[in-house]
Amino acid sequence: MSMGQDDLDETILRMLQGNGKLSIEELAEKLGRSPSTIRDRMRRMEEERLILGYSTIVDQERLDIDAEALVLADIDPLMEGKAMSALMSLEEVSEVMKVTGEPRLMFRVRASDRQELLGFLDRKIRPLGFRRLDVRLILDRPVRYPGSV
């Protein structure tokens, strides 16, 4: 445990990771604590940035997102910060990571189909100054979602 978290904090975090829809009242009831105690704990963990946010997992295929790729990209270290900010501002880019070795950056791109994905890379990504793009299409995503067995 870090930053002053105790067993109650750890239990709250585990429960929320399993089911992010649990209300403060449900957590309090399951843990035998008052809702104000749970609310205070969650607020503190949010302020300490231990809890970074809450999200919903959606079925991408039902949203017509049929093309997804991981892109490895190399860029001049002096342009890296600006390029990362630009990537994070693009709706089609869902994740940006600095990685070890070369290329230095990796990001996840989503589009309705492969043609749109390739067009997006040409129109929006190449102009950012990347020296090399290594595009890996994702064929299948067997993902274990929170709360699933």
Image (tube, rainbow, N blue to C red):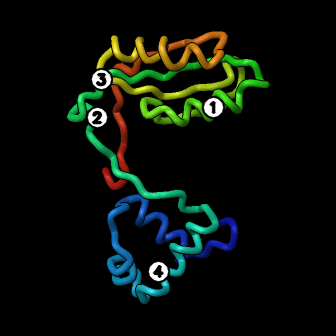
Spatial CA span between label 4 and label 3: 41 Å
Given the image, on which type of amino acid does mark 4 rest? Ile
Q: Please say if 16 is above or below 86.
A: below
* Residue 130 rendering spot, x and y as whole percentages: 64, 15
- Whole-Å distance between the Cαs marked 3 and 1? 23 Å
**Mark 4 and mark 2 residues within 8 Å of each other at the beta carbon:** no
- Label drawn at residue 112: 3
The residue at which mark 1 appears reads as: 84
Q: Nearer the viewer, mark 4 or mark 3?
A: 3
Give the alpha-carbon distance from disc 1 to disc 4, as whole Å.
36 Å
As drawn, the label of residue 38 is: 4
- Residue 109: horizontal and vertical position, in percent? 45, 26
Which residue is denoted by mark 2 in the rendering?
A: 60
Q: Earlier in the sequence, mark 3 or mark 2?
A: 2
Coordinates of residue 77 in the picture (x, y in percent): 77, 24
Q: Mark 4 touching mark 3, by CB under 8 A?
A: no
Q: Who comes first in sequence, dot 4 or dot 3?
A: 4
Type of residue at label 3? Ser
Residue 105 image label: none
Q: Nearer the viewer, residue 20 or 82?
A: 82
